[in-house]
Image (cartoon, grey):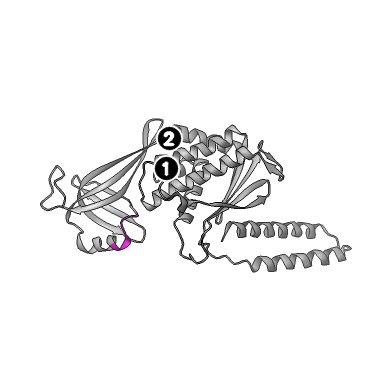
């Protein structure tokens, strides 16, 4: 369901709840009032039932703001509003690059592909509806909805009451994305703002206290990345989930994600052709540290090559 549709669905649901409360307060003498409210309730129920809960192929997100920069539902400080939207857009762009395996360093490539547009001003404090704008003839789902969902997940995890949720998500993002998410929360705190983020069926509001927790978590967390070549054997892949399992010469089993540049078809071929063969895996190791102490380590398979001869203690020339 699109964000705009979800907001409308929630509005109708809230109005039904209000009508129900009014009906519960009426006495037997309020005959005409009861009829009017029951008619309105029936109308709202019909509207709600006709709302299609279909998947949205276009990316969308709604950011609502409260606190010092906002004047009720009338307006928002221009500088703050622009900076907040810009930070969110930057986060989405970096996560899209990571998801598509386009490289982790330097300027964000093909930034136009990850650009969202402000298409509406939404009320209920004050906020912006941001959507992916593409030609109507382009009906195939792009990678942008996934990037927006990833941004939503990272932001939610930073402010979550449970630290385990944040640790899990931190192990999946690159340092640039975490830094940008940290800047977004820092902007909120320095301006005395609160916010609500709606993406798909997810609807999360962040208080000042939760924003402070997020800023502290981000400041205490660092993510280091390194590429390593590891000898061993491929134990298997999950092509649809883009996951792998690799056993090293020492018997350790590494598992994690597979870079998106390696297709599902290739992973399926590996499952039938090279399982158990001596190989060298090029793996991106992502180490999450909290106050300098390692708290989590994750692995992403970047490439795999079969060895020409038996495994050795050093990595030989690959073919």
Q: Along the horizontal axis of the image, is 314 left or right of 123?
A: left
Over which residues does the magenta segment extend? 260-265
Q: Is residue 218 visible?
A: yes
For residue 223, what is the image quadrant?
top left
Q: Is residue 156 visible?
A: no
Q: Main secondary structure of the magenta part?
A: loop
Front residue (pair 41, 68) = 68
Residue farthest toward the left in the current orientation of the protein: 309
Label 1 element class: helix
Residue at image position (83%, 59%) is 26
Quadrant containing the N terminus in the rendered view? bottom right
Front residue (pair 210, 61) = 61
Specify the label residue 170 is tagged with.
Answer: 1
Residue at image position (58%, 34%) is 189
Picture coordinates of residue 84, whole percent (x, y): 57, 41
Picture coordinates of residue 37, whole percent (x, y): 80, 63
46 drawn magenta: no
Q: Are marks 2 and 1 in contact (CB under 8 Å)?
A: yes
Front residue (pair 77, 14) = 77
For residue 74, what is the image quadrant?
top right
Q: Earlier in the sequence, mark 2 or mark 1?
A: 1
Disc 1 packing (10 Å; few <14; some 14–19; many ≥20) = many
Name above or below for residue 49 compared with residue 118.
Answer: below
261 drawn magenta: yes
Picture coordinates of residue 275, whole percent (x, y): 21, 59
Label 2 element class: strand
* C-alpha distance separating marks 2 and 1: 9 Å
Disc 2 packing (10 Å; few <14; some 14–19; many ≥20) = many
Q: Which residue is mark 2?
A: 221
């Amino acid at each position: 369901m699109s964000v705009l549709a979800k907001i409308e669905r929630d509005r109708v649901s809230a109005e039904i709840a209000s009508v129900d409360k009014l009906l519960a307060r009426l006495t037997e003498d309020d005959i005409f009032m009861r009829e009017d409210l029951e008619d309105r309730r029936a109308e709202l129920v019909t509207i709600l039932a006709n709302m299609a809960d279909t998947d949205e192929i276009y990316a969308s997100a709604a950011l609502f703001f409260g606190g010092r920069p906002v004047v009720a539902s009338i307006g928002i400080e221009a500088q703050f509003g622009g900076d907040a939207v810009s930070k969110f857009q930057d986060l989405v762009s970096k996560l899209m690059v990571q998801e598509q395996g386009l490289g982790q360093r330097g300027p964000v490539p093909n930034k136009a592909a990850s650009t969202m547009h402000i298409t509406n001003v939404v009320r209920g404090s004050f906020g912006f509806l941001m959507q992916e704008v593409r030609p109507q003839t382009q009906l195939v789902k792009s990678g942008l909805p996934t990037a927006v969902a990833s941004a939503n997940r990272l932001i939610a995890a930073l402010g979550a009451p449970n630290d385990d949720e944040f640790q899990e998500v931190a192990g999946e993002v690159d340092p640039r994305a975490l830094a940008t998410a940290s800047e977004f929360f820092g902007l909120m705190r320095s301006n005395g703002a609160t916010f609500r983020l709606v993406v798909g069926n997810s609807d999360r509001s962040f208080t000042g206290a939760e924003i402070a927790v997020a800023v502290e978590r981000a400041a205490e967390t660092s993510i280091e990345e390194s590429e390593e070549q590891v000898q061993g054997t491929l134990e298997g892949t999950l092509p649809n989930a883009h996951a792998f399992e690799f056993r090293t010469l020492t018997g350790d089993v590494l598992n994690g994600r597979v870079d998106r540049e390696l297709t599902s078809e290739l992973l399926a071929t590996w499952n039938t052709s090279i399982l158990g063969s001596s190989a060298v895996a090029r793996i991106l190791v992502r180490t999450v540290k909290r106050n300098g102490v390692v708290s989590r380590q994750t692995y992403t398979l970047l490439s795999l090559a079969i060895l020409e001869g038996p495994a050795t203690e050093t990595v030989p020339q690959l073919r």
